[in-house]
Amino acid sequence: MNITEPFAIGNSGIHLLDPRPRVVIAVLFSTITAVLQQFPPLFLAFALALFLVFRARLNPVIVGKRLTILGLFLTMIWLLVPLTFEGELVTRFWKLNIYLPGIVYSAKITIKSVTILLIFMSLVATMPITTLGHTLHRLRLPEKLVFLLLITYRYLFVIGEEYVRLRTAMKIRGFKSGTNLHSFKTTAYLIGMLFVRASVRAERVNQAMRLRGFNGHFYSLEDFAAYRSSGWFLTFALSLLILILVLEWLL
Amino acid sequence: MAALTTDSAKTDPLIRITDLTFIYPGSVKPVLRQLNLDFHQGERVGIMAPNGSGKTTLFYLLMGLLKPDSGTIEIFGKPVRSEKEFENIRKRIGMLFQDSDDQLFSPTVLEDVAFGPLNLGKKPAEAKLIARDTLNQLGLEGFENRVTHKLSGGEKRLVSLATVLAMEPEVLLLDEPSNGLDEETKTRLITHLSDLDLSYMIISHDHDFLYELAQSNYTMKNGQLEPMERMHIHYHSHPHTSHRH
Ligand SMILES: Nc1ncnc2c1ncn2[C@@H]1O[C@H](COP(=O)(O)OP(=O)(O)O)[C@@H](O)[C@H]1O
Ligand SMILES: [Mg+2]
C-alpha cells in the first residue's frame, strides 16, 4: 500500500495561497466544468487548468503518471461509446458502425475529466492532507467528517501493514489463493481478522485520545493568517469562470 | 532521589489503591484480586511480571479506562470514580501506551504533540511552542513536519513520550517503553527519563532498563503486586551512570 502526497510541499505561488479559496475555487471550477456542453468554454476551462498546474510548478512526470491512470478509463470510453451512442454515421469499420455523437461525447468526457483532475492536482493536492482537513473544517464541513478523513489517512497505512503481515503469515504456511472453498474460506477469515484488528485498534486509539484530553472537539494548529493574500487569485479565477459560463450560454 | 523517597514516606501517597479487584466482562477469573499499592511523590517504581499477569490492566484502571469491580483508587488524596473525576486526573497523569501506533494518531508529529495542549485549552501558537520545546528536550529537533506513520519504531516511541510530556504531567505511567528499541535508542530513553523531575511507574521486562530507572520494583502474582527483593544485578553495557545510592 503506498499513498503519497508528491505535490503537497512546495513554494510556488499556489502553494503559498490561503487554502480556503483554493478549495472553494476547485469545487466551483470542477462543478462548472462537469456541466459544460460546448467546446469553446471547455477548451477555455482546460487552458485555465493547465495554467494552474504550470503556476503550481508540479513535477510533469508525476502529473503524467496520474493522467495515465485516467487514460485507461478514457480508453475504455473511446472503445465503447462511439460504437453504441447512435446517431449520424461517420464511418463503417468492418461490421462496426461508428457514430458522430459518440465521438463528440467521448471527446467531451476526455476534456472534462482531464481538466477536473488537473484542477484538483494544482489547487487541492498542493496542500498536505492535514491542511485540507482543517480547511474543510473552516469551510463548515462537520467536525466528524473531517476527523474521519484525517484518521482514515493515518490508519490506512497501519491496516495495510496488518494486511501484509496476515498475508505473509498465511503464505509461509503454504497458502495459495485459488478458486476453491478452502481459498474462499481463508480469504474470508483474513478479511474478518482485519476488521477485528481494526476495531480493537480503533478502541485503543480512542482511549489514547481521551487520555490526552480529547472531548470530541477538534482544534487546529493551522494559522490561516500566515498565508499570502488571495485577492488576486479569487478575482482572476472568478472572472474566468464567469467568462466560461457566458461562453456556454451565448453559444 | 534518595532524599525524595525518605520525605515522601511522611506525606500522603499520590496514588493509593485499596483492595482493587477487576474481572474482564465475560471472564470468570479476576485479573486483579484485592490489589493494594501506595505510590508516593517522587517515587520511581518498576513492575516486572510475566505476560498476561494484569500489568496493563492496572494502568488502564488507574487512568479510568476500565472500571473496577470493587476496591478504591485515591489519587492526589481524593477517591476517583466517575468519568468526570478521571478527566481531571488525566490532565495530571500521563500514560505511554504499549503500542506507539495507538498513541500517534495525527498525520504529522507536531500536530500529535500539540494535540494534548490544545485540548487543555492552549492557543494554537502556545501549543506549537510547547510541542516544539518538548520535541527539542527529547532531542527530536526537526521532527515537526515528519509524517508519524513513516517514523521508525524508536522514533515513534520517543515522539509518543513527547506527546505525553507536552501535557506537563506530574506522574507518568509507562507501559513497556523499551520494548523493541535498539540499544542506542534505549540509552537515549534512559537518559531522558532519568533527567525528568517526575514520579513514574514503569512496566518492563528489561532488567537493565529497570535497574537504571527504578528505585523499587514489584512483580505481580495472583492479581496482586509483590515487592521484589532487589533487582538481580545483571551486567549492563550502558556507560550510563546509575542513580542508585
Ligand atoms: N479486553 C480484554 N478482554 C478480556 N480479557 C482481556 C482483555 N485484555 C486483557 N485480557 C486478559 O487479561 C489478562 C491480563 O492482561 P494484561 O493486563 O494485558 O496483561 P499484561 O499487560 O501483564 O501482559 C490476560 O490474561 C488477558 O488475556
Ligand atoms: Mg501489557
Image (cartoon, helix red, strand yellow):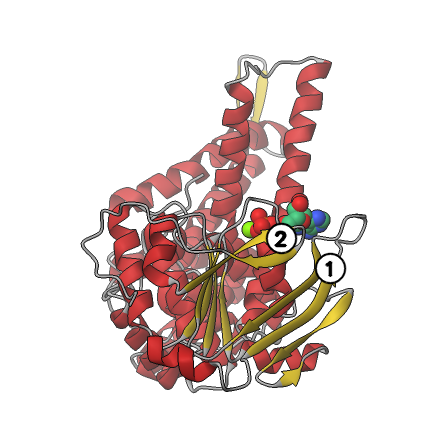
**Where is A31 relative to A161, above or below?**
below
The residue wearing badge 1 is B22
| Number of the label disc, if any, that sits on residue B54 | 2
Q: Is residue B130 left or right of residue A117?
A: left
Asked if ligand 1 lies within 8 A of label 2, the reply is yes
Mark 2: which secondary structure? loop
Mark 1: which secondary structure? strand
Identify which residue is drawn at 58% across, 79% down: B89
Mark sitting earlier along the chain (2/1):
1
Give the amino acid at mark 2: Gly
The image quarter containing residue B100 is bottom left
Q: Is residue B27 left or right of residue A218?
A: right
Badge 2: chain ID: B
Instruction: Specify few, some or many for label 1: CA neighbours under 10 Å numbering under 14, 14-19, or 20 or more.
Output: many
Give the amino acid at mark 1: Phe
Residue B23, x across and y down, in percent: 76, 55
The image quarter containing residue A228 is bottom left
The image quarter containing residue A145 is bottom right
Identify which residue is drawn at 21% across, 61% down: B241
**Where is B80 relative to A195, above or below?**
below
Residue B161, x across and y down, in percent: 39, 64
* Towards the viewer: A176 or A110: A176
Residue A32, x across and y down, in percent: 52, 63
Q: Are marks 2 and 1 on the same chain?
A: yes
Q: Are marks 2 and 1 in contact (CB under 8 Å)?
A: yes
Residue B226, x across and y down, in percent: 57, 57
The alpha-carbon separation of the residues under discs 2 and 1 comes to 10 Å
Q: Is residue A17 left or right of residue A88?
A: left
* Towards the viewer: A229 or A40: A229
Badge 1: chain ID: B
